[in-house]
Image (tube, helix red, strand yellow):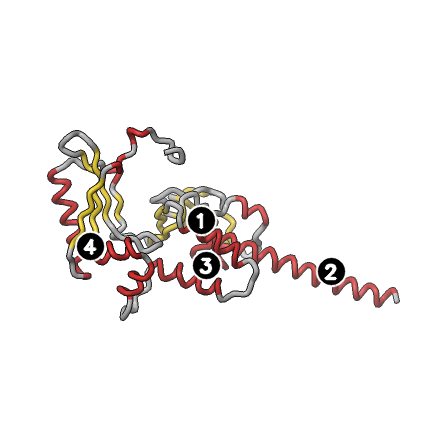
Amino acid sequence: MKTKQVAFEEVYDLFAIRIILDSTPEKEKEECWKVYSLITDEYTPSIERLRDWVSNPKANGYEALHTTVMGPRGKWVEVQIRTKRMNEIAEKGLAAHWKYKEGTATENRFDKWFQQIRETLNNEDPDSVNFLQEFKSSFLTEEIYIYTPKGDIKMLPAGSSALDFAFSIHSAIGAKTIGAKVNHKLVPISHKLSSGDQIEIITSNKQKPSEDWLKFVVTAKAKTKIKDALKEEKNRLQTKANTLYKGSWKVWA
């Protein structure tokens, strides 16, 4: 309530109903939406409260349809619609996720995030602990949906900047970003994105990451890559300075 600055009366999910379907994998999405249709035919829904995590699962693997409808006694009621598989993953987490994944070749968003953790744990870099701390923060943050110029969807933590998006595409793109077009309008790399934005990244081979970038990025990947680039540049300048110093000493000697 404090974070979102809402009054007690505006908290809609004080009372919730969960509907769990016994569906086959190929019919899960269709049957979840059928149940949603039946509920909204009977009760008036709050359109802005619809959450479609069936079409676009959360990064932690969570899938469900959430809606809020006006109950028969004039009270808002949250309705959660999910299948047995979705419910088991929601309740048991990672273990259930991998149980259902077994035997499939599909890689979803959660798999990519989990692989990133694995790579970090295998890395002996002392910054790994900092990365995991930042990863945890962004992992638990509310998400926004951003569209690429081709219409593909990227999920980012709320508060992400255009630069966060650039790094989410590729580290090399992020490092060369000089600006962006959000909904066809030019914006700086520090521009904060909103759910539903469509963004196009503008790059330049002359661009290099700066320490100021750390002030407005929020994703663990962006922070880590910027710090890595700054460290590399510092080492390069130090090596160059040492080389010049040794050369000058030889001339003097």
Of labels 4 and 3, the one closer to you = 4
Q: Which residue is mark 4?
A: 83
Query: Which sits earlier in the primary sequence, circle 1 or circle 4?
Result: 4
Query: Which sits earlier in the primary sequence, circle 3 or circle 2?
Result: 3
Q: Whole-Å distance between the Cαs marked 1 and 4?
A: 28 Å
Query: Which sits earlier in the primary sequence, circle 3 or circle 1?
Result: 1
Which secondary structure lies at badge 3? loop
Residue 169 occupies quadrant:
bottom left
Q: Which mark is residue 170?
A: 3
Nearest to the observer: residue 83 or residue 198:
83
Q: Which mark is residue 186?
A: none
Q: In the rendered structure, which amino acid carries the disc numbered 3?
A: His
Residue shown at the point (28%, 65%) measured from the top left: 99
Q: Which residue is mark 2?
A: 241
Q: Check if mark 4's residue and mark 2's residue have beta carbons within 8 Å.
A: no
Of labels 4 and 2, the one closer to you = 4
Q: In the rendered structure, which amino acid carries the disc numbered 4?
A: Thr
Residue shown at the point (49%, 58%) measured from the top left: 171
Considering every residue shown, the one lying at the far right of the view is 253
Residue shown at the point (16%, 58%) measured from the top left: 23
Relative to residue 107, is residue 91 depicted above or below? above
Nearest to the observer: residue 61 or residue 51:
61
Query: Which sits earlier in the primary sequence, circle 2 or circle 1?
Result: 1
Relative to residue 226, is residue 67 depicted above or below? above
Q: Which residue is mark 1?
A: 137
Residue shown at the point (12%, 44%) measured from the top left: 38
Relative to residue 192, is residue 57 depicted above or below? below
Q: Check if mark 3's residue and mark 1's residue have beta carbons within 8 Å.
A: no
Query: Which sits earlier in the primary sequence, circle 4 or circle 2?
Result: 4
Which secondary structure lies at badge 1? helix
Q: Is residue 199 left or right of residue 242?
A: left
